[in-house]
């Protein structure tokens, strides 16, 4: 009842102000509000330290994608077996996958990359952005902000290789610091986390072994994309057709 009254009222309102159509008027208000906001907030100046850390982070880290991660996370061809190669992967996200709360963790990661870059003990570093790679994140069943620490053994001469280990280390998105992230490596604190051996293990979990990880990633990503009202509609359709 109210809704239909509104529908009738709207064109009437617009017509009453023929000189300035309603849309134009709203646009005007919007622009004014925008001007007020932008003039009140000074342009954000990145601090030189942040800029330096971000620059180092950009040059030394690899970016993982659904297509390249298997080729990136590999052993160093120049070392001889038996040896392992360590990879530390920072898992991040954006407004959708991290609810916009990954900024502090990313800053801490960038600073720890700057600390680790010069250290011979440091593992290779990579970043997985769940906002850009939602299917890969779902296929590993991981969420930001977190660290995945991999140790990948080089195959022996007969091509046999022990399974890679994977340690999943969630980060506290409020309080994580660069010191915490770098001491995972420098003080071997990653070893406090037990290796993950469940079905989602990226290298030899059940899903990876049967090439089901990426399809599963698509399925879970699809569910996360489904608008929340869709199940309600489907249920109401189904219950109606049963009655
Ligand atoms: C972290 O470094 C990346 C480059 O790898 C940069 O794009 C990003 O803006 C930096 N983020 C912060 C919060 O410093
Ligand atoms: C994320 O959200 C913030 C605030 O809501 C916004 O300023 C920013 O542009 C958004 N970023 C992206 C990539 O959508
Ligand atoms: C980021 O850190 C600041 C303090 O350094 C804190 O006030 C803020 O709540 C943190 N942001 C998030 C999203 O946790
Ligand atoms: C993250 O850190 C904050 C502040 O130190 C703390 O209150 C919170 O309980 C921590 N969250 C988790 C999941 O440990």
Image: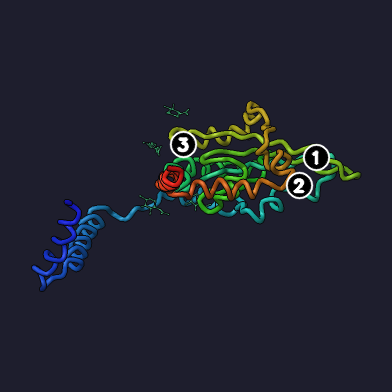
| Residue occupying the point 80% across, 50% down | 78
Vertical position of residue 5 compared to residue 100: above or below: below
Give the farthest residue toward the bottom: 19
| Residue occupying the point 62% across, 52% down | 64
* Dot in front, 1 or 3: 3
**Disc 3: residue Cβ within 8 A of ligand 3's nearest atom:** yes
Looking at the image, is mark 1 or mark 2 earlier in the sequence?
2
Q: Secondary structure at mark 3?
A: loop
Q: Tell me residue 2's x, y (percent).
A: 17, 51
Q: Which residue is mark 3?
A: 173
Q: Is residue 34 left or right of residue 187?
A: left
Q: Tell me residue 6's x, y (percent).
A: 16, 57
Q: Which residue is mark 2?
A: 75
Q: Which residue is mark 1?
A: 83
Dots 3 and 2: beta carbons under 8 Å?
no
Q: To which quarter of the image does residue 87 belong?
A: top right
Crowd tier of the residue under label 3, counting other residues whose Cα lies within 10 Å: few below 14, some 14–19, many 20 or above: some
Q: Is residue 165 left or right of residue 182?
A: right
Towards the viewer: 220 or 138: 220
Q: Secondary structure at mark 2?
A: loop
Towards the viewer: 1 or 66: 1
Give the farthest residue toward the front: 243
Task: Find ligand 3 in the image and state its quadrant.
Answer: top left
Q: CA distance from mark 1 to mark 2?
A: 9 Å
> What kind of colouring is applied to the model shown?
rainbow
Looking at the image, is mark 1 or mark 3 earlier in the sequence?
1
Q: Tell me residue 69's x, y (percent).
A: 66, 51
| Residue occupying the point 53% across, 42% down | 109
Q: CA distance from mark 3 to mark 2?
A: 31 Å
Q: Is residue 193 left or right of residue 226?
A: right
Q: Secondary structure at mark 1?
A: loop
Circle on res. 203: none
């Amino acid at each position: 009842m109210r809704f239909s009254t509104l529908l009738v009222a709207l064109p009437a309102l617009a017509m009453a102000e023929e000189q300035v159509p309603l849309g134009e008027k709203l646009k005007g208000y919007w622009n004014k509000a925008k001007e007020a906001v932008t003039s009140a907030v000074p342009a954000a100046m990145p601090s030189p330290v942040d800029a330096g850390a971000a620059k180092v982070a950009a040059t030394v880290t690899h970016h993982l994608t659904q297509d390249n991660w298997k080729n990136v996370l590999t052993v160093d061809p120049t070392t001889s077996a038996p040896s392992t190669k360590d990879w530390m992967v920072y898992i991040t996200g954006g407004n959708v996958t991290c609810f916009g709360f990954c900024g502090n963790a990313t800053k801490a990661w960038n600073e720890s990359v700057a600390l680790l870059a010069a250290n011979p003990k440091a593992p290779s570093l990579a970043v997985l952005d769940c906002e850009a790679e939602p299917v890969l994140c779902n296929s590993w069943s991981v969420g930001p902000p977190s660290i995945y620490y991999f140790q990948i053994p080089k195959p022996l001469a007969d091509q046999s290789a022990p399974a890679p280990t994977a340690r999943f280390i969630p980060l506290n998105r409020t309080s994580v610091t660069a010191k915490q992230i770098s001491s995972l490596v420098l003080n071997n604190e990653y070893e406090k986390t037990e290796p993950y051996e469940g079905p989602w293990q990226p290298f030899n979990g059940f899903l990876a072994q049967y090439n089901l990880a990426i399809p599963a990633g698509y399925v879970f990503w699809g569910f996360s994309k489904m608008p929340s009202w869709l199940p309600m509609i489907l249920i109401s359709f189904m219950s109606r057709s049963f009655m």
